[in-house]
Amino acid sequence: MYNHVFVLQHIDSADFPRPLRPMKEPVPSNPCLPLSLPSTGFLQREADTIAPKSIIKQLRRSPSPPSIDELQEALSSPLIESTASPTISSPTLSERLFPQHAAGKAKAQAPRGRWKEPEPYEVLRAVERRDVMYLMEVRDRAFHLLVRQSGGVTPLLHAMRIGKSHSDVAVILLGAFSRYVNHLEDEEMTRPQTKRILKALRANLKLAIDYGLQSSQSDLIASFLQTLVMSEGDKWVSAQVSNISLALRAGTEGKPVYTAQTAVRKFATKELGKAQAIAALDD
């Protein structure tokens, strides 16, 4: 049995033709000129301005830094760790028949060695190679190496001396300093280990500020100064707030803005106190 419903519908529709739809007039084509893309120079300037701020913001949101106990363990741990001798087991039948599979299995089951604290020259070499991932690992496992001086230079100062090609490395190190200070607890500020690290951190920032002024690299000086003030703690900040409050109460004669600028500049370095025309710092 066949279904001829569609054939019958076609025959029936042939006797009553359907009205044709009116054709629409085509839309006339007019030439259009799209807006030109920004120049490469403009995009490069925007990237140079926004990228350091984004990196610092991302670093401040990263997980908390290692605790003081972990830093003490890193400082006291030997450079070469002794490993226990592996137990030797007799090979199985399949390993004797297929030695290539046994070698691959042994390689896959070999235990990974523990992370060994690098030497200071290895950190400087990572700065030269712009190895950001390695510097991140050093930041998380042995932060004190990022502020330690080796061969008369620190990692931050070494990155600045190389030039603008390594400005991103300087931003990474600055973000690591700011992150460490932001995650310090109040009870950790009184520990001797923390005081030594903060003292070295402040020395790094002051050297970076002076070198930035000497080499006309003033784009990061405001960030250096901000981290430097944060590392000093509440004692210095509270004292300056008290002094500025007295200047504000005295009105225009007290010169509160000048008092605040002078206090911050004197706090950092003598060279910064003499510096002028640094827009980011004035802001």
Image: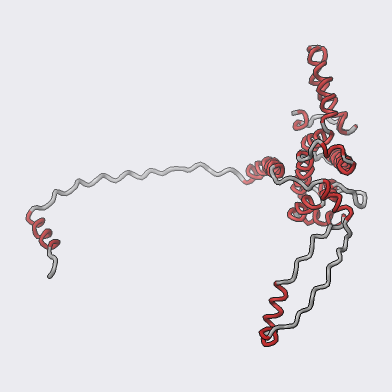
Q: Position of residue 249 (x, y in %)?
A: 79, 13
Q: Quadrant of residue 189?
A: top right
Q: In this view of the protein, which residue sits in the foreground, 72 or 253?
A: 72
Question: Does 20 sit above or below residue 91?
Answer: above
Q: In this view of the protein, which residue sits in the foreground, 274 or 132?
A: 132
Q: Position of residue 120 (x, y in %)?
A: 87, 55
Q: Write the residue at 80% across / 73% down.
A: 86
Q: Position of residue 194 (x, y in %)?
A: 86, 42
Q: Residue furthest left?
A: 15
Q: Quadrant of the C terminus?
A: top right
Q: Write the residue at 90% across / 49% down.
A: 149
Question: Does 253 sit above or below residue 33?
Answer: above
Question: Does 225 sit above or below residue 78?
Answer: above
Q: Quadrant of the N terminus?
A: bottom left
Question: Does 99 sit above or below residue 125?
Answer: below
Q: Write the residue at 16% across / 49% down.
A: 20
Q: Quadrant of residue 179?
A: top right
Q: Residue furthest bottom?
A: 97
Residue 215 appearing in the image: yes
Residue 214 appearing in the image: no
